[in-house]
């Protein structure tokens, strides 16, 4: 599980900010019923009702901070500086709404160590209850096959970065269920864990397109993984690499330049994507068995070219252009002149 440090201060003692990722802001709006009940609750400030409303308000605060964490992680941050939480009443046309807004500056600190409970000698009852709830939810989703347990608990799962349910979360995406939540889930998890899981799905014909969608939208491009895909024995897996090259990483390093050079070398090799048909100069034979004129790029019968691409696919030329462009930008940013 990854850790994101959140602080109300603008600096972290003893640490230098390596990269500022920009302002992040999220908000949660609740209906008029909550606001009206909240106002009414002041009639019983010292009774049990005040504690109930306190807990309800805390849930809203926790939700807006959890959403803020997701936005920060999407940008490749591991810390949020200057956390600020505001709440406002929104009224109009005889209706009232209650809005809680959280904002801060997302940043990345390379040498950041966030304390965990690995060496704790005692735990609070709150921590115990949280871990118990977490484990019970994992069991309901994975063991009891409770399909709704996942869909009704995205907020808790994302906030607590529960990596144990990746298979079930991916199944939701496969069935076009809660796509935004699934994307936020893989964005919130440890980057290496998400990359390892999602790239493994590319070997499966039925899972490939969903995995590509999540990788690109969660900004989980990994150039080293792309090279592995391009050198796979499975031609379909190689083609999936071409679709990923125009994606984005959360953070780039100088070493990406050398990896991109290798990608370009593979893309320009003659055997990167071999011909599936046969070229006879003035005509070519498609993999479907039909003959086409040399001037006909795509087979008029099945719509594939000699390498098996369709007009909608990312071609070798397009992937090469994207890799070359990314290489040029990174060389400029890292001031590499060769």
Image (cartoon, rainbow, N blue to C red):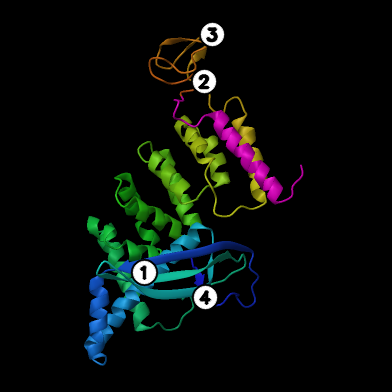
Quickly name the residue at label 1: 63
Tags 1 and 2 touching, CB below 8 Å: no
Mark in front: 4 vs 3: 4
Number of the label disc, if any, that sits on residue 275: 2
| 1 or 4: tag closer to the N-terminus | 4
Q: x, y percentage for residue 172? A: 31, 50
| 3 or 2: tag closer to the N-terminus | 2
Mark in front: 1 vs 2: 1
Magenta stretch in the rendered image: 309-338
Quickly name the residue at label 3: 280
Locate residue 214 relative to residue 174 in the image: left or right.
right
| 4 or 3: tag closer to the N-terminus | 4
| Residue that protrudes farthest toward the top in the picture | 282
**Magenta-colored segment: predominant secondary structure:** helix
Quickly name the residue at label 4: 7
| 3 or 1: tag closer to the N-terminus | 1
Q: Toward the viewer: 203 or 293? A: 293
């Amino acid at each position: 599980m990854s850790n994101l440090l959140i602080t109300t201060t603008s600096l972290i003692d003893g640490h230098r900010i390596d990269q500022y990722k920009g302002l992040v802001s999220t908000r949660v709006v609740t209906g008029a019923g909550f606001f009206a009940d909240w106002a009414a609750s002041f009639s019983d400030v010292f009774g049990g009702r005040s504690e109930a409303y306190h807990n309800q308000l805390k849930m809203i605060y926790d939700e807006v901070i959890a959403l803020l964490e997701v936005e920060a992680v999407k940008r490749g941050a591991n810390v949020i500086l200057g956390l600020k939480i505001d709440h406002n009443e929104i009224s109009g046309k005889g209706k009232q709404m209650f809005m809680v807004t959280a904002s801060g500056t997302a940043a990345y600190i390379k040498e950041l160590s966030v304390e965990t409970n690995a060496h704790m000698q005692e735990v609070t009852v709150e921590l115990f209850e949280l871990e118990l709830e977490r484990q019970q939810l994992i069991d309901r989703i994975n063991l009891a096959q409770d399909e709704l347990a996942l869909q009704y608990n995205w907020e808790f799962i994302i906030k607590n970065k529960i990596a144990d349910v990746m298979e079930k979360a991916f199944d939701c995406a496969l069935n076009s269920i809660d796509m935004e939540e699934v994307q936020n889930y893989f964005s919130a998890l440890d980057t290496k864990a998400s990359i390892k899981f999602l790239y493994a799905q590319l070997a499966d014909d039925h899972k490939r397109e969903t995995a590509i969608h999540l990788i690109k939208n969660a900004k989980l491009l990994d150039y080293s993984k792309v090279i592995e895909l391009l050198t796979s024995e499975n031609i379909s897996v190689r083609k999936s690499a071409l679709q990923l090259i125009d994606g984005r990483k959360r953070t780039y390093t100088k070493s990406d330049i050398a990896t991109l050079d290798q990608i370009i070398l593979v893309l320009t090799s003659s055997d990167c994507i071999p011909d599936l048909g046969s070229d006879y100069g003035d005509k070519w034979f498609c993999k479907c068995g039909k003959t086409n004129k040399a001037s006909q790029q795509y087979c008029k019968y099945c719509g594939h070219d000699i390498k098996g691409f369709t007009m909608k696919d990312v071609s070798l030329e397009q992937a090469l252009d994207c890799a070359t462009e990314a290489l040029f930008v990174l060389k400029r940013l890292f001031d590499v002149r060769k």
